[in-house]
Image (cartoon, rainbow, N blue to C red):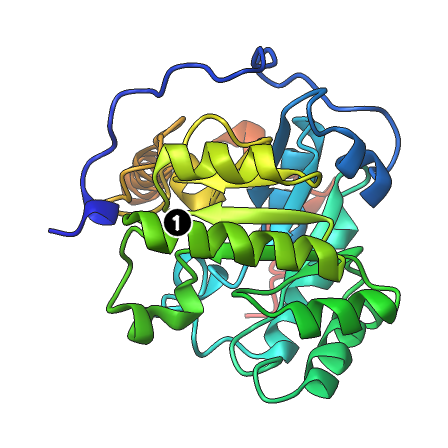
Amino acid sequence: MDETTTKPSPPAPPGSFSPPSPGAPGPPGRATVPEIVAAKGARRLVMVTATDEPSARWCDRAGVDLILVGDSLAMAVLGRKDTLSVTVSEMVHHTRAVVAGAARALVIADMPFGSYQASVEDAVRTACRLVAEGGAQAVKLEGPRPREVEAIAAAGVPVMAHLGLTPQSLHRLGGYRVQAREAGAALALLRQAKELERAGAFSLVLEAVPAEVGRAATAALAIPTIGIGAGPHCDGQVLVLADLLGLSDDPAPRFVRRYEALGQRMRDAVAAFAADVRSGAYPAAAECYPSPEGLADALARGGGGG
């Protein structure tokens, strides 16, 4: 079994920051890209994924700094086996819903597979569509693509970069595998990270890399790093909401920590509803609307139309 699909390991030791108390909100008001950049070294950033208005609304109320409309919605919401089939139109649709629910967090939309790889022009066009039609405040793209990052940023759209395990490249990588395991690969990742920073990325997601690689990248960059399976030394952390809440099935990646078991609780709640329906316990009198005055007499007089 691959390392990224084993059972979660024990909690990692704390890094150089003191973690916030559960549910502690970030700064008041709508988060901005300059505020996110300024958080580096001052406070840890919290990012989660969301795909609809209710999930965005509740995550926003919990005080997260950033909400990612991730192309992971392919598996978490649409029941697909990987992220590769998600379209720009689907990302626009889900981004619009998330923006409707997020009053404070910065909303970032993933650029889906095939929407930026063919040309820089495609990349800029996709980014502008996610902002103009979806309402995103920033976009995220995968891989060492400084030309695309520079062009999108020049068009006025903030860009979050993404290195390490890049799920859109799963066929090239041979699956969902830990990256930068060897010194040469780790140094290459650090060079790519610096290139993306110079190109104008305002932050960098690091996925499934050794903790020391996460530490080195965080120390080398002036922009925040957001880790997902990259150790405790990153400037922030992100998890897919379905994994965090226990809505996805096992096996979970090694880096996932389940904070709830909502899948089990949903099943139990629906099963209880079904049992009440079948037994006649639902609906009860208190859950019914009162009878119109005089209806019983009218029915007794044969006013039922039969």
Decide: is 220 above or below 186: above
Residue 60 locus on image (x, y percent): 70, 35
Residue pushed farthest left?
A: 1
Q: Nearer the viewer, residue 201 or 184?
A: 184
Q: Amino acid at mark 1?
A: Ala
Residue density around tag 1, few if under 14, some if 14–19, many if 20 or more, within 10 Å = many
Location of residue 246 by image quarter: top left
Residue 99 locus on image (x, y percent): 76, 53
Residue 77 visible: yes
Q: Secondary structure at mark 1?
A: helix
Q: Quadrant of the C terminus?
A: bottom right
Residue 234 locus on image (x, y percent): 53, 32
The tally of labels here is: 1
Decide: is 20 above or below 3: above
Location of residue 273 by image quarter: top left
Decide: is 8 above or below 146: above
Please give the name of the residue rendered at 62% of the width and 80% of the height, measured from the top-left corner.
116
Q: Nearer the viewer, residue 119 or 45?
A: 119
Q: Residue at label 1?
A: 186
* For residue 47, side relative to residue 246 (left or right): right
* For residue 161, side relative to residue 85 (left or right): right
Please give the name of the residue rendered at 39% of the width and 49% of the height, measured from the top-left corner.
186
Q: Nearer the viewer, residue 105 or 118?
A: 118
Please give the name of the residue rendered at 65% of the width and 68% of the height, measured from the top-left corner.
146
* For residue 237, side relative to residue 177 (left or right): right
Please give the name of the residue rendered at 37% of the width and 38% of the height, measured from the top-left corner.
266
